[in-house]
Image (spheres, rainbow, N blue to C red):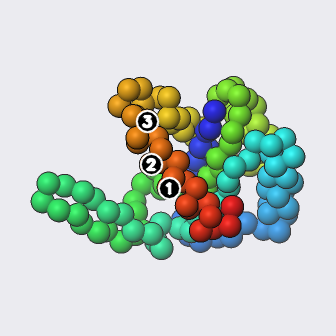
């Protein structure tokens, strides 16, 4: 099962403070362990919210709101997507992440079977076609 690990932003990440070489090295080693174990599907850091934008959808239309956004504790600084056997396995992996002062959140990613009968065979086939097309477009 897949889990998304959301790395919460901090005042430093929102200020655009980049990790040190030591921090990047430690994170690279951790990511390498995830790859060797075959559980890492994706991992990326995010620029500060000042470079981001939000779209808000209402019945009246869509509004676009430029960053930065308030409430740093609600913002994200990065993510991993892991393919592991359980939430507990994800937690065990993330206990080893080289953070000293950070907060993360682990959320399970929906799988097709989670949607029940609403996710018809036709919808599954269409989704699979789009995934294959996207993978081909990006050389995966």
Disc 1 designates what residue? 130
**Furthest-left residue in view?**
60
Can I make out residue 9 in this image?
Answer: no
Indicate the position of residue 32 as horizontal and vertical percent values: 85, 52
SS at circle 3: helix
Q: Earlier in the sequence, mark 3 or mark 1?
A: 3
Left or right side of 116 for 2 = right
User: Viewer-proximal residue, 79 or 23?
Assistant: 79
Q: Which of marks 2 and 3 is nearer the N terminus?
A: 3
Disc 3 designates what residue? 121
Could you tell me how far apart the alpha carbons at marks 2 and 3 are, in whole angstroms?
A: 9 Å
Left or right side of 54 for 32 = right
Q: In which quarter of the view is residue 109 placed?
A: top right
Quadrant location, the N terminus: top right
> Contact (CB < 8 A) between labels 1 and 2?
yes
Q: In this view, does 117 lie above or below 110?
A: above
User: Viewer-proximal residue, 35 or 80?
Assistant: 35
Indicate the position of residue 37 as horizontal and vertical percent values: 84, 41
Q: In this view, does 35 lie above or below 21?
A: above
Query: Residue drawn at (36%, 63%), measured in percent from left and top?
Result: 54
Indicate the position of residue 8 as horizontal and vertical percent values: 57, 50
Could you tell me how far apart the alpha carbons at marks 1 and 2 are, in whole angstroms?
A: 6 Å
Indicate the position of residue 93 as horizontal and vertical percent values: 76, 37
Query: Residue drawn at (27%, 59%), measured in percent from left and top?
Result: 56
User: Viewer-proximal residue, 98 or 114?
Assistant: 114
Q: Is residue 59 above or below residue 47?
A: above
Classify 10 Å Cα crowding around label 2: few (below 14), some (14-19), many (20 and above). few
Left or right side of 50 for 139 = right
SS at circle 2: helix
Disc 2 designates what residue? 126
């Amino acid at each position: 099962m897949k889990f998304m690990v959301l790395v919460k932003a901090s005042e430093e990440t929102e200020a655009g403070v980049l990790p040190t070489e030591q921090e990047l090295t430690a994170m690279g080693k951790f990511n390498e362990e995830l790859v060797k174990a075959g559980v890492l599907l994706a991992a990326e850091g995010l620029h500060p919210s000042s470079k981001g934008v939000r779209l808000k959808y209402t019945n009246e239309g869509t509004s676009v709101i430029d960053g930065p956004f308030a409430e740093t504790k609600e913002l994200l600084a990065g993510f991993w997507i892991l393919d592991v056997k359980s939430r507990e396995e994800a937690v065990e992996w993330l206990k080893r992440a080289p953070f000293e002062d950070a907060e993360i959140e682990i959320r399970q990613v929906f799988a097709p079977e989670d949607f029940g009968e609403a996710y018809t065979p036709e919808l599954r086939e269409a989704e699979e076609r789009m995934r294959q097309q996207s993978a081909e477009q990006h050389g995966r």
